[in-house]
Amino acid sequence: MKSFSNRTTLLYGDNAVSKFKKAKVALFGLGGVGGTCYEFLLRSGIGHFELYDHDVFEESNLNRQILSNLFNLTLSKVEVAFSRAATINPQAKVRPHDVLVDETNVSSIPEVDVFVDCIDDIRAKVALIKEAHNRHTKIFVCLGTGKRMDPTALTVVPLSETSGDPLARRLRQDLRKEGIPLEEVECVFSKENPIPFEGTEIPSSMGVPSAAGLILGALTLKYLAAHLG
């Protein structure tokens, strides 16, 4: 029987897969973007995860969040993700943190090789980017995926090259105040204009968030293969 990592090894090579096994990734947010990113990295053989989310699954998540199903509604997202690892890659060490990340607790995040930011809260994003900058830790950041329909409009750019995204605009403003160079913040960004909408619940389906999660996962693997010792 062929091994769990056989197809991944054929694609990335033995050296890269060995790096994946010893890599430590901190993933923030396990919703539409983060859940798919986690699934990709878990199946790619990442050896250690620090997972952060302070939310539970609800029925409205079923249309787009890969980790949600009818049997885990009301359950903690990080605990569901923790249990899922045992059904796919039991060799992975997964530490769930049912925590709302902000500037008061980012310093307690363990040392890892990569931060992957899949959250929507602007204060938390600023805190994570600032912490990654201070640690000299690579961070990949996802910008807005709601109110959008076209996964092919996603691209990867420095934060300094984004436009038309309200989340990116706020992030640029706040990071300039913190003295963080925008050029060093690598983002998954949609060139699609968000649909006009007024309301508290953001329109979204699976396509754009999951595509963004896959891109974040691919960026993470590429970085680890090239930079991990």
Image (cartoon, rainbow, N blue to C red):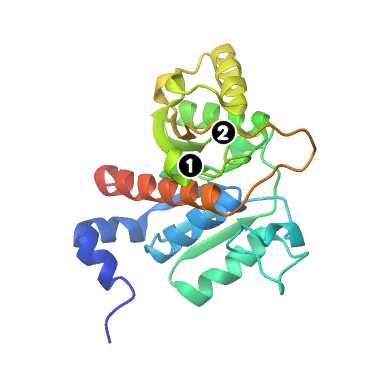
Residue 154, percent across and down?
Answer: 44, 39
| Residue drawn at (60%, 64%) of the image | 67
| Direction from residue 185 to residue 32 in the image, left or right | right
| Residue drawn at (72%, 34%) of the image | 197
Residue 71, percent across and down?
Answer: 71, 74
Q: Residue 154 carries which label?
A: none
Quadrant where the image shows the N terminus? bottom left
Task: Look at the picture and state if 202 lies above or below 37.
Answer: above
- Residue with the mark numbered 1: 115
Residue 74 or residue 28, whichever sits in front: 74
- Residue with the mark numbered 2: 128
Please tell me whether mark 1 sits on a helix, a strand or a loop. strand
Please tell me whether mark 2 sits on a helix, a strand or a loop. helix
Residue 161, percent across and down?
Answer: 43, 21
| Residue drawn at (41%, 61%) of the image | 47
Q: How crowded is mark 1: few (under 14 residues within 10 Å), some or many (20 or more)?
A: many
Q: N-terminal of the two: label 1 or label 2? A: 1
| Direction from residue 208 to residue 54 in the image, left or right | right
Q: Which residue lies furthest to the bottom in this view?
A: 1
Amino acid marked by disc 2 = Leu
Which of the 4 quarters of the picture holds residue 103? top right
